[in-house]
Amino acid sequence: MDWGKLPDLAAVILFASAFAAVARRSRAPVSKLWLTGWLMIALHFTAAAFASLPNQTGLVATFMSVTALAWAGMLFNWASEPNRTKRSSFWMLITMMGANCYYLGLLAFDPSNTWARTAAAITLGILPLTLALIGVRGKNHPLRWATVVFYCILSVFLLAFQDRPGTGTLLAVNAVLFTVYIGCCFHFWFAYRRATAGAFVTIAGFLSWASVFVIVPSISTFLPSVHFENEVWNLPKYIVAVGMILLLLEEQIEHNQYLALHDELTGLPNRRLFQDRLNGALERARRTNTNAALLLLDLDHFKHVNDTFGHYAGDRVLEHVGNVFLARVRRSDTVARTGGDEFAVILAEPVSRADAERVAQSLVTLLDEPFYLGDRRIPIGASVGIALFPDDANNAEGLCIAADLQMYDYKHRHSTPINPALPFPVASFSAIDTRQRLQNAD
């Protein structure tokens, strides 16, 4: 047994444990795949410790070590594909893992079988190309074609050098691993094209990891007197581990920042972001001497929906309302969820009162149509209030008060007793003199 591998194994286990602790709290769907890949790396070092044993035991350990290293890289590749949930992507992964395993098995257990090795080398190029062509109607992602190109180049290289006396097997193994890990570098570069420390460290780590499989055989061939400790060649693995942990932490921070400004259920801006957007809209309107409008909408009898159909149905109603509002307004406008059943719409571009009333009427009309959850018919209604800047108020707080007064006046004037057998009523919208309401409130 090679006891010199134990420090590397211990280091990888520590990194994998740290990675698991971060991944457990991460919402990133790739975290479990990455963790599985690092468990493969741990298996690689464990098997490598027994590779020096004589006879068949050493061959099996060597095969397991190299195969685990290749499979780890392939899992990292697959985790970076945006279409990995598709069946074709999964079958590409499983098929290529099997093809690589078969080829590496031939190199380890039957190196003299030239015919089988040649057929396996050709298969490594033909197989991904065939799978990509079969799934071409499924709008293949460019990363899949990049994988095809890498493996076609690998196939040609293997056919040219795998039978070279003395160094053919070593070149073949390193070529397979180089292809896997240069693919990791390309996949991560494509998936994380952003100027962050995590992306830079991970991509640079994979590039240096792939370079090891070129530098080591080159030194062995051209500079046999030069010797480096094995720990030097394992440094890229630790760099990648650190980079992946940084990526998970960065994504967790981004998610926390998103939650601080958005409603978790509907994904709409929350009250904090709404206030910021409203102030920005009013400032632009003030600079350009134009109008901006604020619509406040409160769902009618929403408590009755929760009590009658349950909170799950209430959540689906809120999601539906948010989607309806987003589909109706312009991209430049803002739809926010400002309370439990309260929504706000900021019409930021130059808008007249008639335009705002028309949008409000259309939103109320859209909610007048019942919402179906399974076979349950859930009626939805809303009360709406409008305030126009600068006609009704000249600041954000005054605009919110004006729209709120108008909304509750609308709700009180059109309130109707609840009849669970009928849709909740939504009366037609009519404008109110907001300035007069504010004066009365004072």
Image: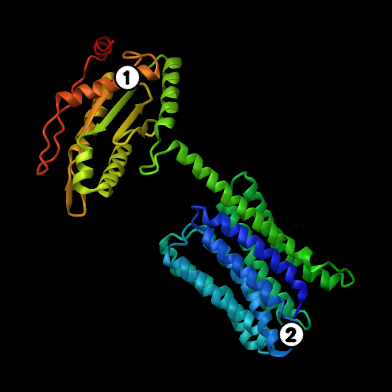
Of 98 and 232, nearer the camera is 232
Of 82 and 296, nearer the camera is 296
Look at the picture and state if 292 lies above or below 35: above
Rendered image: mark on residue 88: none
Look at the picture and state if 281 lies above or below 169: above
Residue 404 is left or right of residue 94, and the answer is left
Q: Can residue 68 be seen in this view?
A: yes
State the quadrant of the C terminus: top left
Residue 335 is left or right of residue 253, and the answer is left
Q: Which amino acid is tagged 1?
A: Ile
Residue 372 is left or right of residue 400, and the answer is left
* Structural distance between the alpha carbons of marks 1 and 2: 81 Å
Q: Which residue is drawn at 26% across and 31% down?
A: 298
State the quadrant of the N terminus: bottom right
Element at label 1: helix
Which residue is identified by label 2?
53
Q: Residue at x 36, y 44 (%)?
A: 265
Q: Which residue is drawn at 43% across and 27% down?
A: 277
Quarter of the image for residue 415 reads: top left
Look at the picture and state if 21 lies above or below 343: below
| Between discs 1 and 2, the one toward the N terminus | 2
Q: Position of residue 391 (x, y in %)?
A: 32, 13
Q: Position of residue 141 (x, y in %)?
A: 49, 58
**Colouring scheme applied when the structure was drawn:** rainbow
Classed neighbour count for the residue bearing mark 1: other residues with Cα under 10 Å, few (<14), some (14–19), many (≥20): some
Residue contact at pointers 1 and 2, CB within 8 angstroms:
no
Q: Which amino acid is tagged 2?
A: Leu
Which residue is identified by label 1?
401
